[in-house]
Amino acid sequence: MSLQNQPLTFIANLMSFGISEVASKCARILVVVAMARALDLVQIGIVAAAIAAGDILKSFTENGVGQRIIAASDRNLDAICATAHRLFWVWTVGLFCAQLMIATVVYLFGGSIFLSGLIALMGVEYLFMPAGLVQVALAMRVGKLKQIAAIGGLQNVGANLMSIALLTVWPSAIALILPRILSAPIWLVAVRRLNPWTKPHNTPFAPLMPFVQYGWAVLGVEVVKAMRLQADKLVVGLTLGAETLGLYFIAFNAGLSLSNAFTTAFSTVLFPRLAQSRDRLASLRQSLLVGVGLIVPLVTLQALLVPVYMPFLLGPGWGEIELLVKILCLVAIPMTFWATAAGWLRAKGRPQTELWITSVLAIAVIVNALALGPFGLLPLTIGYAVITTIVTLAAAIVALRAAFHSSNFVVTI
């Protein structure tokens, strides 16, 4: 068993990524606070629409190429890294061009030039990514998860703090987008120093087809996942207007966005552990117990503290969304079980199954937004929570049943 597969190391990695994600989300909540005080709900709604559109496209960066590096054998590692490096460049430059096209289409179909400009500006971030993505995957492969967590956390926190500073002197939506671009070079320098890599001379390229066969489903999962997280915001904006979208955006960030930090951290550290474990069943069981044992109490505590931290952060006048925030916090609990099942499916080479389940959930969430959105944010939020809980728990039970249905079920922590 490698060091990073040991339970205590897994817990340490989970805590590192958890702290990083929570710090990032807390900084983002501070940005939401600054937004609530500096911008009106219409401006917040415009920002939410731009971020939603940008995040959906950004999900295309999660194409499974990095996971091929993490799971590669030592014998094939150089060739796989060489092919991955080329793929990263082609892919991210293509995404930058796609972002510009989306901005153009939004403008041509009646969107404001300001919204189109925000969407186009967000695409610049892609140009900094390909020179560091191989290094990130290699660092995760050798167990440098704490360092990757620290770099990601510092980048996100730094960008959010820059947004807050800009909002105080320049109350404009662009203050929320520009720091994402300014922080990208910092991330690039840090990851390249963490795990230096250059393509060895005369190294052959690995075949492309295994990347395609594995990556298309992983890519589909991430795109559909982004649609699930963002499409309801777009529906709310189209059906109820920018002001209501701004209110929903604040509730979502104060609730699910923060609690989801724990499940995001869990998913990040779970795959490397399962991919490199000699006993995947034991690692899976241990990981689930650790994840549930840590995440459920934290999320429950967050929900209980909503009446305390909401007025403190946002000031008076936001009591109408406290119940929404509580409900959205608790959604992270069933998502922890599904994150475990999804990591198990990817480690078993079955991302296609994850894709179909994620697609069902995304469609259900969009239908819920269309059906319940016109009745108000509370019915919409309750429907979101109920649908997400039912689909994720049912899928997790089916996916993990075989793993836990074993005569030699033994858990050692």
Image: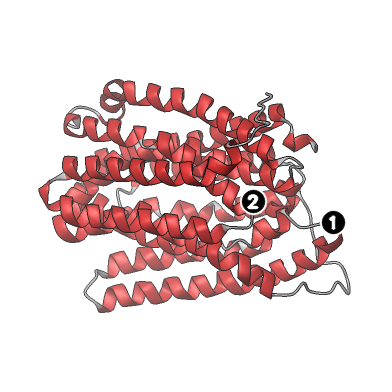
Q: CA distance from mark 1 to mark 2?
A: 17 Å
Q: Residue visible at 32% across and 77% down?
A: 105
For the question of whether residue 137 can be seen, the reply is: yes
Give how far across and how far down residue 2 sits, in percent: 80, 38
The residue lying at 69 percent from left, 75 percent from top is 208
- 307 relative to 139, above or below: above
| Total labels drawn | 2
Q: Position of residue 382 (x, y in %)?
A: 23, 40
Neighbours of disc 2 within 10 Å: few (<14), some (14-19), many (20+): many
Numbered label attached to residue 347: 2
Question: Is 362 left, or right, of 400 in this rendering?
Answer: left
The amino acid sitting under disc 1 is Asp
Residue 223 position, x and y percent, is 45, 61
Query: Viewer-proximal residue, 291 or 395?
Result: 395
Q: Residue 221 versus residue 18: which sits nearer the camera?
A: 221
The answer to which of marks 1 and 2 sits earlier in the sequence is 1
- Above or below — where is 363 with respect to 149? below
Residue under pointer 1: 74
